[in-house]
Amino acid sequence: MHLQTYAIVNQKGGVGKTTTSVNISASLAELGYKVLAVDLDAQANLSAHFGYPTDEMRQDNIDENDTTPLVARKSMYDVLRYDTPIEDILVEVDTNLFLAPSSLLLSAADLELGGVIGREQILKRALTSIHDKFDFVIIDCPPSLGLLSLNGLVAAAKVIVPVQSEFLALHGVRQLLDTIDQVRTAYNPALIVGGVLLCLHDSRRRLDKTVADTVREYFGDLVFSTIIRTNVALAEAPARGCSILRYDTKCSGAEDYRNLAKEVLSNESKSNKIRNQSAA
């Protein structure tokens, strides 16, 4: 299959964006696809979730017997700021699964890249060199709609929007969809919404069911059939530096993300069939 690039975006924090980025990547890799997870957030939560030592973790190394020098490793900052080939920063974190790690230095990206011509296209250009090396690129965007998220949207073919089962989340999604329309008009005409994903859902709560019904009524077919249920293992996995598939392979969180990966693949298959029919 040709490379599929997804941006996981929501300007609201705490809705399951990074959790989704990690576990959809791991689920696709488990199915045999070669996946690259790109961490565009200066907080580096995606990198930490995969067990990759972030800037703070390296500086807070308290093992006095460890003589390994605390050398600053290359990250997405080097790719965006200095045109470092993205291949030079990749870390293999699991079978078929690679990470392009983040750095706290990315927090200055808006200022440092503000005067760069074509600054919204930097990530898209960087990914051209790996088009034949991966099946999927999953981009974890920061919880804001600044330059980093814009790079993610310009580089992506599709957007997945995680939504928490609460009413206030709907307002942010409407704003995000407007932003996606603007990006489509100005920079990336092929960009589409690949799906709205209900996360942190507790079917025992009447509010969650009401919000889920409202989301489906408002966004229709854009909403994934798969719902990510509230599961304590999903909150515990980051501390172990691994995906939910490695931490608790039989829990409901692992089941949900495996189902999401299958739904994404099914949607890709339908899209390919439609494209082939149109071409014929």
Image (cartoon, grey):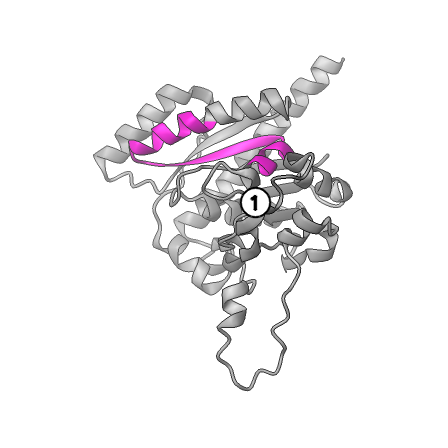
In the rendered view, tell whether residue 244 sits above or below residue 20: below
Q: Quadrant of residue 159?
A: top right
Can you see residue 98? no
Q: Would you say 18 lies left or right of 31 here?
A: left
Give the residue at x 52% y 51%: 107
- Locate the N terminus and report the quarter of the image it occupies: top right
As for residue 254 lying within the magenta part, the answer is no
Give the residue at x 45% y 29%: 176
Instruction: List x then y, in percent, for residue 154.
Output: 62, 32
Label 1: which residue? 111
As for residue 163 lying within the magenta part, the answer is yes
Instruction: List x then y, in percent, for residue 3.
Output: 70, 37
Observer-nearest residue: 173 or 60?
60
Give the residue at x 61% y 22%: 186
- Locate the C terminus and report the quarter of the image it occupies: top right
Observer-nearest residue: 253 or 220?
220
Give the residue at x 58% y 42%: 139
User: Which contiguous range is marked in magenta?
Assistant: 150-176
In the rendered view, tell whether residue 32 sits above or below residue 240: above
Amino acid beneath label 1: Leu
Q: Residue furthest bottom?
A: 65
